[in-house]
Image (tube, helix red, strand yellow):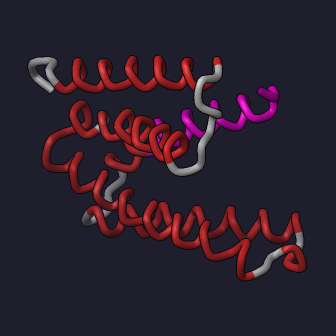
């Protein structure tokens, strides 16, 4: 694994893990407004990235899958906001752990990442198990 990939993964986890709590404290009228502002922020960052890389590198094939992934992400973000409103941050926060599990399983079974029977596959499996145990344990803590 390259160090740059690990750094980007850590930045992603920190950003996704940190955005839900502050956005719940902003005085917006509902979850749809929170999701809209998060999506607008993402759109601005995507426009900056496009300006840096250059539009000439964008094709329909390169555009479509990330676009649909973004649509799924936007819907899931809205669901996360609604969930935290109804069940609280502690239990709603387990959404992130479950996302990691689903993401790892999709990578393993759909994209064959990491290659089966490799050290990375074994580590991925161990990480998924630890994440699932943590999510279940967090969801069972009294008072959350």
Instruction: Name the residue located 81 percent from the left edge and 33 percent from the top edge.
Output: 4
Quarter of the N terminus within the rendering: top right
Reply above or below: 106 against 8: below
Instruction: Name which residue lies at 80% across and 76% down.
Output: 58
Q: Is residue 45 left or right of residue 137?
A: right
Q: How many marks?
A: 0
Residue nearest the observer in this picture, 70 or 38: 70
Q: Is residue 72 magenta?
A: no
Q: In this view of the protein, which residue sits in the foreground, 9 or 101? A: 101
- Residue 37 coordinates in the image, percent (x, y): 46, 65
The x and y percentages for residue 73 are 45, 60
Q: Quadrant of residue 129?
A: top left
**Residue 141, horizontal then vertical, whole percent:** 15, 18
Quarter of the C terminus within the rendering: top left
- Say if 63 sits above or below 130 in the image: below
Q: Residue at x 78, y 63 (%)?
A: 49
Residue 3 within the magenta-colored segment of the rendering: yes
Q: Residue at x 40, y 42 (%)?
A: 102
Judge whether 110 appears above or below 78 on screen.
Answer: above
Q: Position of residue 112 (x, y in %)?
A: 60, 43
Q: Based on the displayed image, in which of its 4 quarters is residue 54 positioned?
A: bottom right
Is 15 left, or right, of 44 in this rendering?
Answer: left
Vertical order, 10 against 81 (above or below): above
Report the magenta residues as a range.
1-19
User: Looking at the image, which residue sits at the far left?
Assistant: 142
- Prevailing SS of the magenta stretch: helix
Left-right relation of 34 to 41: left
Q: Is residue 69 left or right of residue 129?
A: right
């Amino acid at each position: 694994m390259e160090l740059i990939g690990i750094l980007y993964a850590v930045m992603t986890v920190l950003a996704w893990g940190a955005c839900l709590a502050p956005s719940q404290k902003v005085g917006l009228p509902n979850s749809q407004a929170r999701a809209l502002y998060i999506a607008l922020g993402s759109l601005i960052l995507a426009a900056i990235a496009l300006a840096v890389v250059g539009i000439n590198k964008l094709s329909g094939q390169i555009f479509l899958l990330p676009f649909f992934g973004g649509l799924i992400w936007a819907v899931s973000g809205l669901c996360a906001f609604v969930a935290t409103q109804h069940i609280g941050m502690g239990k709603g926060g387990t959404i992130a752990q479950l996302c990691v599990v689903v993401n790892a399983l999709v990578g393993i079974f759909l994209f064959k990442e990491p290659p089966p029977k490799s050290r990375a596959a074994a580590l991925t499996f161990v990480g998924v198990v630890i994440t699932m145990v943590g999510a279940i344990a967090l969801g069972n803590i009294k008072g959350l």
